[in-house]
Image (cartoon, rainbow, N blue to C red):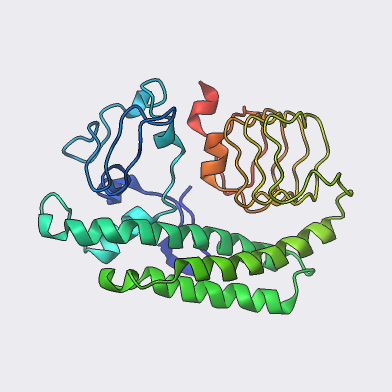
Amino acid sequence: MPLHLTGHPGVPLTADCSKCFALCCSALGFERSSDFAHDKPIGQACRNLAADFSCTIHAKLRGEGYKGCTVFDCFGAGQQVAQRGFGGRSWTEHPELKPAMFAAFPVVRQLHEVLWYLDEAQRLAASSRSVPAAARSAVLALTTETVGLARLEPEGLAGADLEGLRARVGAVLADVSTAVRKAAGGPRHPRRLAPGADLLGADLAHRSLQGANLRGAYLIAADLTGSDLQHVDLLGADLRDARLQGADLSHALFLTPMQVAAATGDSRTRLPNRLEIPGHWQD
């Protein structure tokens, strides 16, 4: 289901590839690794990109060595750049637009990711009286500011202070997270379950982690099978190959489609309402 920013119906937060010009497959670059089968320089179209901007191996990306493609999400930035920023004119039919379009996309993509988090913060503030009024106001102000940046003309995007914006947004999201997790009354957790924790391959199966702050934690290949992850702050946590089969993340905080797609799970995994079970979980 398409998701739009609360209060801004014209700002999408989910990708619509039919309204984009495969900017993720052309503007961005990647290096050969376990996620990508070949090197691709920034600004060069992927060898698997068709003339109509479709992927010639879309149905078998993971099997062909392009797992990274199945994890990536632009949070709706692709269609915003293509349609709003460049009036629906493609970089193939109008090659003179290519430099500006390719430069705009990664910036707008970062701004839309910020909006994904701010949108959730708005929803949390609306459903929880525990969120302080100052934090509520800050979330709304930062949302308005970020929407304004995302709507700048391509030449104006180059001067956007993304690092500063992320720092300010991160601080406000931390305030919202603290209030929501405290209100949820989750149990106290061992010191190792903390922001930035090294939990690579950790056995956390069938554990109640409710209310833990795992912001930025390394959960690569961690076993979270059947665990309770409600009201766990997972902002920026690395969930690559984490096992989420049967886990309850229905009220996990600041979880993104990319994190979910990078993990493994099944039909028993409970996700927040605005996230869908990745198709490759069924493979």
Is 149 placed left or right of 140 in the picture? Answer: left
- Residue 234 placed where, x, y %? 66, 49
The residue shown at (17%, 53%) is 91
Image: 63 above or below 205: above
Is 90 placed left or right of 269 in the picture? Answer: left
- Residue 95 placed where, x, y %? 11, 54
Residue 94 is at least partly visible in this image: no
- Residue 72 placed where, x, y %? 43, 42
- Residue 103 placed where, x, y %? 28, 59
The residue shown at (83%, 39%) is 208
The residue shown at (27%, 68%) is 154
The image quadrant of residue 58 is top left
Q: Nearer the viewer, residue 34 or 19?
A: 34
Number of marks in the rendered image:
0
The residue shown at (49%, 54%) is 3
Image: 162 above or below 242: below
Q: Nearer the viewer, residue 104 or 137?
A: 104
The image quadrant of residue 66 is top left
Residue 178 is at least partly visible in this image: yes
Q: Nearer the viewer, residue 129 or 151?
A: 151
